[in-house]
Amino acid sequence: MQRGLSRAWMAAMRYRARASRLLVAFVAVAAMVAAAAAPVAAAPSAGGNKAGTVGVRLASAGSPTRSAPSSTPCFQSSLVCQSTNPDVTLGLVSLGDTSACTFHGTFAWGDGSQTTFTFSGASNGSTLIIKKHHYGAARVYNGTWAALLATGSTCHSSSGSFQFTLECTPIGASWVTKFPDSHDISKLSPAFKGHVTRFIHAMTRAGIAEHTVTTLRPLERAYLMHYSWLIAKGKLAAAKVPDFVPAKGKPYVTICWTKAAAGKTVAQAAKALVAAYGIDPKLKVAPALKSRHTAGNAIDMSTTWSKRSITIVDGNGHQVKISSSPHSGLNSRLIAVGATYGVVHYLTAAKDANHWSTDGH
């Protein structure tokens, strides 16, 4: 949740006599907020000059995705803001007539990156430029902005700073709704999708009930599943979990591994998340960080049948009779049939009854 802050003025240099004064306004709003921009009052003039003063004001802008819920705009009343939403929008607004001027602008975001641009002035209250930025790891970012006068004799350069704290969300079952798995066979890689489709069709005709649990898994979800399982099993201290490093253009995972949801210990919260994921309680190894699932080359599916003996057609067209136990994916004859379709059961079968892939990994 964002704790906002309201109007804040950044001081500008003054012209003497009939020269106007100028400040550059700065707009910063976290994502998923759709409030209307606050109107800008006419600024006082210097020496009667109609151009007036250009100052700082806040307005809502933009609605970036993949963000935590927000209730109010960020930077509502000062240039300091804390939020669980990693997306912010900064803009420059003219509070006074700057239409005769042009500027070189910079936003240094405080994370080692910056955005530079050139823009023209406009009438009082006009939004001159808007830039969006996505922050990464949960921490404090000290940024700066500048609008340097390029042309024009009635305006001044302006600059200032802002601080954004990206807060993290405690570990808990609520994370299960983030970065969802796909249960759709069509999301598998093209070749493996064909193999799986044929195998499932053969099982269905043989009287085997199949339930697809997972196909394609986002890397973010794999990260959450892997480390929540390790913490829940007491195999890794929460403080030692590394930050998630996303691929370019992908979202960060702003989870607090060392903080639990209200009323729980970290271990309890991790167990609740593992349970929410539906991870098999009998699983002996942590869900993989990078796996055939994240590449679309694996499927988790439960299988069972009620008849004492069934006959299934393998990938070579041969009929195979299965009258042995167990009646699940751990059956060695069913595993052998799957391999003829190019659907290979997890090589250490007892550790994961439901996992099938291109190569058994």
Image: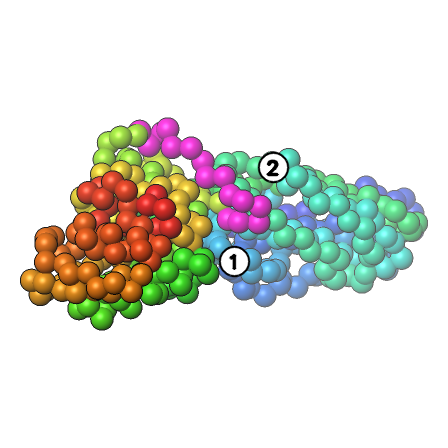
Q: Are marks 2 and 1 in contact (CB under 8 Å)?
A: no
* Colouring scheme, one of rainbow, by chain, secondary structure, one colour: rainbow
Which residues fall within the magenta stretch?
237-251
Q: Kindly tell me whether residue 281 is visible in this rendering.
A: yes
Q: Magenta region, mostly helix, strand or loop?
A: loop
Residue for point 91% across, 51% down: 152
Give the total of numbered labels. Answer: 2
Mark 2 and mark 1: Cα distance apart in space: 20 Å
Question: Which numbered disc covers residue 165?
Answer: none
Residue for point 19% across, 45% down: 281
- Looking at the picture, tell me which residue is in the foreground, 323 or 75: 323
Reply above or below: 18 against 141.
below
To which residue does mark 1 refer?
Answer: 65
Q: Is residue 136 left or right of residue 122?
A: left
Q: Position of residue 69 (x, y in %)?
A: 44, 56
Quadrant placement of the C terminus: top left
- Looking at the picture, tell me which residue is in the foreground, 341 or 180: 341
Q: Position of residue 205 (x, y in %)?
A: 22, 71
Q: Type of residue at label 2?
A: Asp
Tell which circle, 2 or 1, labels the residue nearer the N-terminal end.
1
